[in-house]
Image: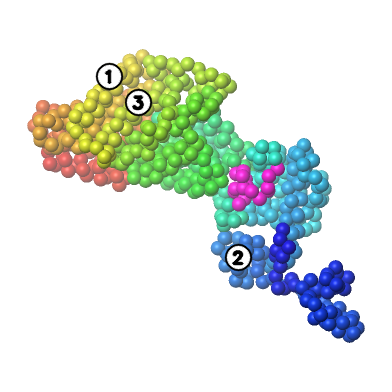
Amino acid sequence: MPLYSGLTPDSLTPLGPDSAGLGGGTPFSAGGAGQKRRSQTEANGSVKKKQRTRVSYSCSECHRRKQKCDRQIPCSHCIARKVPELCKGYTPGKADGDLAARLARVENIIEQALPQYASRLGSSIPQSPSDGGDDMGIDTESLHGDSGPQAEDSDPQGGILQGGKWYGSSASGSVTTQPLLEQLHAQSGELGPVEDPQTPAERLLRLIQDCGVSATKVPELLRELPESKVMTDRLVDFYFQQINYTRYPLYEPAFRVSYESIYANQGKLHPNDIRFLPLLFVILATSVRLAPEHLAGNSAARRITSLRYYWASRRSLLIAAAVQSDSLELVFARLLSFRFLIFERRITECWAQLGAAVRTAQALGLHRDGTKLGLDAFNTEYRRRVWTYLYHADRTHALILGRPPSISDDYTDTLPPSNIPDDALPTAQIVMPSSEPLSKPTLMTFQILRHSLAIIIGHIVHHFQNLRGHSHYSDVVHLDQELENFIQTLPPHYSLDPDTSLDHIYHFVPVHRFLIITEVFFVRMSLHRPYLLRRSDRYNLSRSASFKSARLDFRVRQLFKRSVSDSVMRSLGGGYREFQAAMTAGISLVLEPDGPESDAMRQIVDSFIQEHMIIGDELDETTRRELKVIELLQSKA
């Protein structure tokens, strides 16, 4: 430390006669002047001068942060950081005591939780009270449980050390703050600086102490959960039984472990669990939105509750990203938020959520195959699944919005997932089990087929978005042939003329068959739609392919609606696909009002209008606009 570090004009006070100065004088006396003043003082009866007391006008927080204080209580800086209760007058010399107290607290925690590390600390400092965790509601009472009485000057609101974790209370609830075991293992067995924010607990503490985030934010998010765990269990069970296989499927065992951890500590949230909160909230939002009336109330109540859970997910996502920015939980939370917004027909808002999910996945290295990174079989397969979800979502949404995709094939080598069920995932194996043929359906068969379709969608998007080359209609013909080949090579249980012998065994097969076939029709109509109104015979392929896809889409959709319940049909969403078919049929009627397929096209348009008129006031704005477009085409026909 530099010799003159921390010296101020107020600190340059004379030393007493017993001090070891320069010749008994002050440290800054110069030559005979100092000797003359000392002689005069001795002649006047050796009068001792009192040491001047330093006066500090800054509060303790401004002094700690080296800011200029406006000398108000509370000051403007503490008010801006939302910690007015910490704005207290600063007393010189107290900071060193605070630091020693905080160090003593950490050493006592380590001695009790990890005695094997106690020898590294040298000599132990007796425990003393500290306000080091006040910003976060971390109290300093009774770290040793029943080992002794509480100190008179310690914090009256207590905390407790259990299982190597420090639990402290706050004004509005309790929150877990210091996972000591995790902190020490993160340092590879070495005791690093306490103030260095490496673990989620330390980052959360720094977020609250230095960035002005209120210590009540996490407890407030926990209160957004359903009032009873029984209700939460029902919603989670409903999601995995009725919804999970229709979306981007989560691996249920891993989800259940994190879910139970939320409730394991009686509402005291571990910092590591904060990253799971956004995913849990978006699962609840989706489940409530699609749940039956006896489980979540009427339609209006379900919509309001689901939006409340969705925005709780967005709020918790801000904290989770600050505590631990890159994790698979955040990838899934953003991906399923994207899927939730699609269901709500908020198409343009999805783009930002999906982009954030892709960037987080790339930060985790999911665009590189696990075999190239030396990962075990389970992590390799799990990462492939997540990347496949993102790849399909990115390509599909780029086609819907007419925007460039975020993922480039030139920069990824992750393979598609294996066709194996969840219970066959190699959790304890080094070698991946062999993949089943696509003729044997699993939950991943659908994802593998969609990945192959997403590659073709990427070619279509490149055709329309490429600015450095010339696009020719021959490219459209070639892309249409790719789609035809894809349809012709679908496995028997997923084809246009399907083998339904396993439908009663695997309940997901009819749903997946409907989704993959209608998606192919949507993609094909999107490819040819720019050429529908061109009168030249050169574009006859586009007209015939689009009109045929619209008719087949309507036929498949009507057969599927008659075979499943309304709740299943509602959970699938896909309103933009149905609108695409109805709009194509309407264009056909405008071009050929008395053509050979006019009756079938008129049935598609009339059915779309009738079904949406029944819903009435519950239609969202996007669907209302789509309905007006179809009504306009009907009137023009």
- The Cα–Cα distance between marks 1 and 3, rounded to whole angstroms, is 13 Å
- The Cα–Cα distance between marks 3 and 2, rounded to whole angstroms, is 59 Å
Tell me where residue 183 sits by quadrant. top right
Q: Choose the circle earlier in sequence order: 3 or 2.
A: 2
Please indicate, yes or no, whether residue 310 appears anywhere in the rendered image: yes
Image check: 394 left or right of 86? left
Report the magenta residues as a range.
191-206
At which x and y percent is residue 86? 65, 62
Among all residues in the image, which is located at the extreme left?
594
Label 3, on which residue?
A: 452
Label 2, on which residue?
A: 67
Taking the magenta stretch, the answer to whether it contains residue 198 is yes
At which x and y percent is residue 387? 44, 32
Taking the magenta stretch, the answer to whether it contains residue 469 is no
- The Cα–Cα distance between marks 1 and 2, rounded to whole angstroms, is 71 Å
Label 1, on which residue?
A: 488
Dot 1 amino acid type: Gln
Image check: 363 left or right of 607? right
User: Circle 2 — which element?
Assistant: loop
How many numbered marks, from 0 up?
3
Q: Choose the circle earlier in sequence order: 1 or 3.
A: 3
Residue at image coords 53%, 26%? 374
Dot 2 amino acid type: Gln
Q: Quadrant of the N terminus?
A: bottom right
Query: Disc 3, disc 2: CB below 8 Å?
Result: no
In the foreground, 507 or 21: 21
Q: Choose the circle earlier in sequence order: 1 or 2.
A: 2
At which x and y percent is residue 150? 79, 52
Residue at image coords 47%, 21%? 421
